[in-house]
Amino acid sequence: MQTGLLYNAVQTSGHLGWGTVAMSSPCNAACFPRVRRVAIFGGTHGNEMSGITLVNMWMKNGAEVQRNGVLTKPFITNPGAVEKCTRYIDTDLNRAFTPENLSTPSGDGLPYEVQRAKEINQLFGPKGSPDAYDVIFDLHNTTSNMGSTLILESSTDHFNLQMVHYIKKAAAPESCAVLLNEHPQLRYATTRSVSTHPVGLEVGPQPQGVLRSNIFESMRMIVKHALDFIELFNSGVEFPTCTVEAFRVHESVDYPRDTNGNITAMVHPRLQDCDWEPLNPGDPMFQTFDGWSIPYAGDGPVYPAFINEAAYYEKQQAFVATRRETLAAAAIRKASE
Amino acid sequence: MQTGLLYNAVQTSGHLGWGTVAMSSPCNAACFPRVRRVAIFGGTHGNEMSGITLVNMWMKNGAEVQRNGVLTKPFITNPGAVEKCTRYIDTDLNRAFTPENLSTPSGDGLPYEVQRAKEINQLFGPKGSPDAYDVIFDLHNTTSNMGSTLILESSTDHFNLQMVHYIKKAAAPESCAVLLNEHPQLRYATTRSVSTHPVGLEVGPQPQGVLRSNIFESMRMIVKHALDFIELFNSGVEFPTCTVEAFRVHESVDYPRDTNGNITAMVHPRLQDCDWEPLNPGDPMFQTFDGWSIPYAGDGPVYPAFINEAAYYEKQQAFVATRRETLAAAAIRKASE
């Protein structure tokens, strides 16, 4: 573990997208303000039990998630859905943080999650403003065999890139994939997007409404590593340039369906549970109820994720095809105060 | 496969509980009427996708489930819940076939599933009457690692005992467990109970709302074997006495909970996914969020099933403890017509 200040000479300033908020005093690394406020969200989907259970636990006793000089706020984002153990009441909260929703006047007629999004934006944002929380971890489960996955929304948020690099190393030999969603159409307005550095954490496989001890412990460990990173960063440690292997969202692939929208084939047994493994043109992708295989017909290998995720049938997605990519993270350190 | 008539000399008549409907002409085996009508139910729980998908498929093209001289009726029992991909709308349909519900007058104020139970009882029953369907297979999925499981409601329905014996042999080397629920408190009023010979088929693990090809094919194969048995029985084949290894429902075990009803421990990783394996006194059963083990404290080994089933959190059940038992099936054959 890095314990002292590290310096390196890579010239990165001036090329650092959003996320570089403060550039103070001569600095060979990208400088970010000290992390003051972190939120840990559970229950954005009310039937994803690991995050709900962890957040409820930390709300009773937060010692495990406290770090020096950081306010850590565990928070249940969709209590109505948690109460009913359902994904959502009226609409998917994790798609609800659009400018339109966040600027619409409050009122009795609003869908439950739109009202809730406005409240969360007030408490932890406003989105895009200097008053927003520094980091939000939003804890999710998937029915897919994805293991632990960190989800990023920007390839140029170097604070987050350094954090996921740190987490991946700390979690080894357990693997922790990084899913990057910058796709112009497939990107969506997440709950965590109200913060400066939004991080999704997706752990599976776990059925909806079930709490599995192995998934619970995996999620807990990733959050621990993330908070450790923040504490190190705040202490003044400089993180040198590095690279991060990521899977970039490329395409959404739906099940074959009939004219009524009913599916006519299943994920092929040779694809089922093979998240993150290469799917090459010609590889079996679906199996019809009559036993016929439907091969993947894309150009070149993709790396499927969210294969046969329960919640995505209604979103017309059998899996998301990703492409592997190496992201470059600039050196970072805390800005002088 | 048995193809001719078999006779044996075991004296069984007079000791054959309910299920022996007709005793005609001298007969060394228990005689049952020819099976005329079979129903295959899917969607009793609207988020258990294998049965829903199979039944929808067979409603479009029933060739696969047709057998000589038998009317086979595939039927979606809870279309409202299927539409919403939820277990139920108002109340659990698979607990709703009580005498009180079935005899209550119809009306607008009834819970959806109570109204539905009354309709199903009219279509496939009336329960306990000679007009009822001969056999109903009710297709379910579980999130538990139970494999294929046949659920019986009586240890003295020799027709069903012979059928599950046949299915187990036909399915080998795939295993197919038999769960027997005759428990005075834990038995419940199932959808299939409107028929003379009710059979539950439970296949897992499969998350709610997900269709997995391996689970789909396992369920399909068990139904095929069951229908083959009925065809053989109708053809006049006599099935000699045999024994059936079964797991008898013994006790329901809840999660540890706090005074608000929230769970305070998870299924222990050494118990998770170990359905049908012996759980001995002192074996770890739950794990608290602090990492403490809670051992099983019963007297003697039990065989857990429905371990960490999603739908049973609300029923205060972490698993059902069963005991192994060898059931004796009388010889059976079709009664003379």
Image (cartoon, coloured by chain):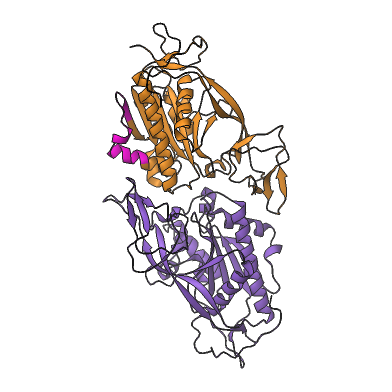
Chain colours: A purple, B orange
Residue A323 visible? The answer is: yes
The picture quadrant where one finds residue B321 is: top right
Where residue A49 appears, as percent x and y from the top left, is 56, 53
Magenta stretch? B54-72
Task: Name the residue at 69% across, 62% down.
Answer: A62
Task: Name the residue at 45% across, 67% down.
Answer: A97
Judging depth in this view, the residue of A311 and A62 nearest the camera is A311
Q: Is residue B215 left or right of residue A34?
A: left
Q: Is residue A314 above or below residue A233?
A: above
| Residue at far top of view | B26
Where residue B249 appears, as percent x and y from the top left, is 59, 30
Task: Name the residue at 38% across, 13% down.
Answer: B335
Quarter of the C terminus of chain B within the rendering:
top left
Where residue B280 appears, as percent x and y from the top left, is 69, 37
Judging depth in this view, the residue of A260 and A55 nearest the camera is A260
| Residue at far bottom of view | A26
Q: Is residue A8 left or right of residue B35?
A: right
Task: Name the residue at 59% across, 70% down.
Answer: A168
Where residue B120 appears, as percent x and y from the top left, is 38, 29
Q: Is residue B195 above or below residue B255?
A: above
Q: Is residue A298 above or below residue B58?
A: below
Quarter of the N terminus of chain B within the rendering:
top left
Q: Is residue A298 left or right of residue B181?
A: left
Q: Is residue B1 magenta?
A: no
Residue B91 visible? The answer is: no
Q: Is residue B59 magenta?
A: yes
Say how many tags the image has: 0
| Residue at far left of view | A259
